[in-house]
Amino acid sequence: MKVLIVGGGGREHAIAEAVSRSSRVDKIYCAPGNGGIAELAECVPITPMEFGKLTSFAKEKEIDLTIIGMDDPLVGGIVDAFETEGLRVFGPRKNAAILEGSKAFSKDLMKKYGIPTASYETFDDPKEACKYLETAKFPIVLKADGLALGKGVLICQDLEEALDGVRQIMEDKKFGDAGNHMVIEEFMTGREVSVLSFVDGKTYRLMSSAQDHKRAGDGDTGLNTGGMGNFSPSPFYTEDIDRFCRENIYSKTVEAMAKEGREFKGVIFFGLMLTDEGPKVLEYNARFGDPEAQVVLPRLKTDIIDVIDACIDGTLDDLDLEFADKAAVCVVLASEGYPVKYEKGKLIKGLDKFRGKEGYYCFHAGTKLTDEGIVTNGGRVLGITALGDTLSEARRRAYEATEWVDFDNKYMRHDIGKAIDEMEEKK
Ligand code: AMP
Ligand code: GLY
């Protein structure tokens, strides 16, 4: 069969890698793809928001299944556009992708169905928001309602900062129309864990837990980024926590969406905070995480096309989802200066060293194929993932593999998964 993947980052590279292992797939296309994906798929120069061009392409090439990697097209209704044309597609429809697309929607859903999350209020008038802040407790969290490239969240230490935050979000429209509405919520403390799941409208199957490192610098210093690396599974996601989340978060969310007439088929990414009062939902995403996909999908043993079929057909209950019993660590190689200012177009050397190395992956995030070869084309350039029997081993191997590639201005954190390493050594 022929598969089209929509997107062009490290996550879509990980999806393409999993699809390339399927015995059912003969040909993969990716729109727009990137320099690394081009080794597995034919890259097509159509951007993810060009729904008309994508559906025409899918019809012309007789694509059997399209997989949507990114949030923007999902929230914009790409799945509905494909279904209207009679095309088979994996991802939530627009009325379900709102779970990620509107923080006010997801907060109201959690409140209505008793799913644990931070207490909150929603506002569409900046004056009302400022009035509310006068009597609020600090720190406090301000969130633009809509998609803002994962950046629409401000954690404010005092009233002055919060009033300024409301102005940035609602008046200066720092995050664009995402700031027409906003959520103000209680600040939570604890460890953050991401859990990915496949969902078929009524049943969910968990993939694995993962933990991100969002700050740019070692020791969690510096600016917030899209993620500098992560590891999976998270040793903090214990059996007790898993049981609690299954009872109080996962099934309730899937049922709530169905009851609201917004049946969710696709991937739900549960962003959790493990607080002293128990796990609470920080956010939902309606897709695989990036770079969570890069530490989870390489371990998927079940044919990904069988899993996706079960999600679309509503038969996930009958499927045995299998993962290799391994740990994974992903270290992001970025361009020095990310996330603020950085140069692009630097030649990447050593990519061929990954060929034939089992358990090592070099996922491309921001790269481009040119006449000279593959060059850097973004802040986050590569995600180097390695598997291991333990997290420590995976970590050692991932850092070993970061030395195989080189480019001018190569930058990485040196402490991805370090806390875990120390924990394992103590045992
Ligand atoms: P979100 O996009 O909602 O996940 O927010 C991005 C990041 O902001 C999260 O990964 C957390 O680190 C932080 N954050 C969001 N909401 C809260 C909260 N209520 N309390 C503390 N930190 C938060
Ligand atoms: N890694 C976080 C996200 O994909 O939103």
Image: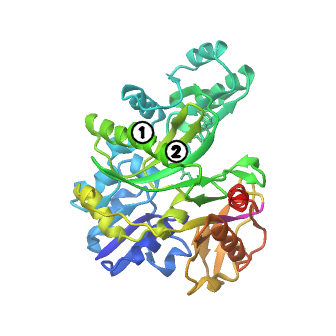
- Left/right placement of residue 89 relative to residue 107 reads left
State the residue at coordinates (28%, 77%).
1
State the residue at coordinates (27%, 61%).
310
State the separation of the CA atoms marked 2 and 1: 11 Å
Q: x%, y% of residue 137?
A: 66, 19
Q: Nearer the viewer, residue 28 or 244?
A: 244
Classify mark 1: residues with Cα within 10 Å, few (<14), some (14-19) or many (20+).
Answer: many
Q: x%, y% of residue 370?
A: 61, 79
Q: Which of pointers 2 and 1 indicates the residue nearer the eye?
A: 1
Snapshot quadrant of residue 156: top right
In the depicted structure, whether residue 260 falls above or below residue 317: above
**Disc 2 on helix, strand or loop?**
strand
Q: x%, y% of residue 239?
A: 49, 49
Amino acid at circle 1 = Ile
Q: Main secondary structure of the magenta part?
A: strand
Residue under pointer 2:
271
Query: Magenta span has 335?
Result: yes
Amino acid at circle 2 = Gly
Query: Magenta span has 184?
Result: no
- Left/right placement of residue 20 relative to residue 23 reads right
Stretch of the chain drawn in magenta: 331-336
Q: Nearer the viewer, residue 71 or 269?
A: 269
**Disc 1 on helix, strand or loop?**
helix
- Residue 32 in view: no
- Residue 249 shows which numbered tag? 1
In the depicted structure, whether residue 156 falls above or below residue 67: above
Pick the quarter of the image with the C terminus.
Answer: bottom right
Name the image colouring: rainbow
* Among numbered discs 2 and 1, the one appearing first in the sequence: 1
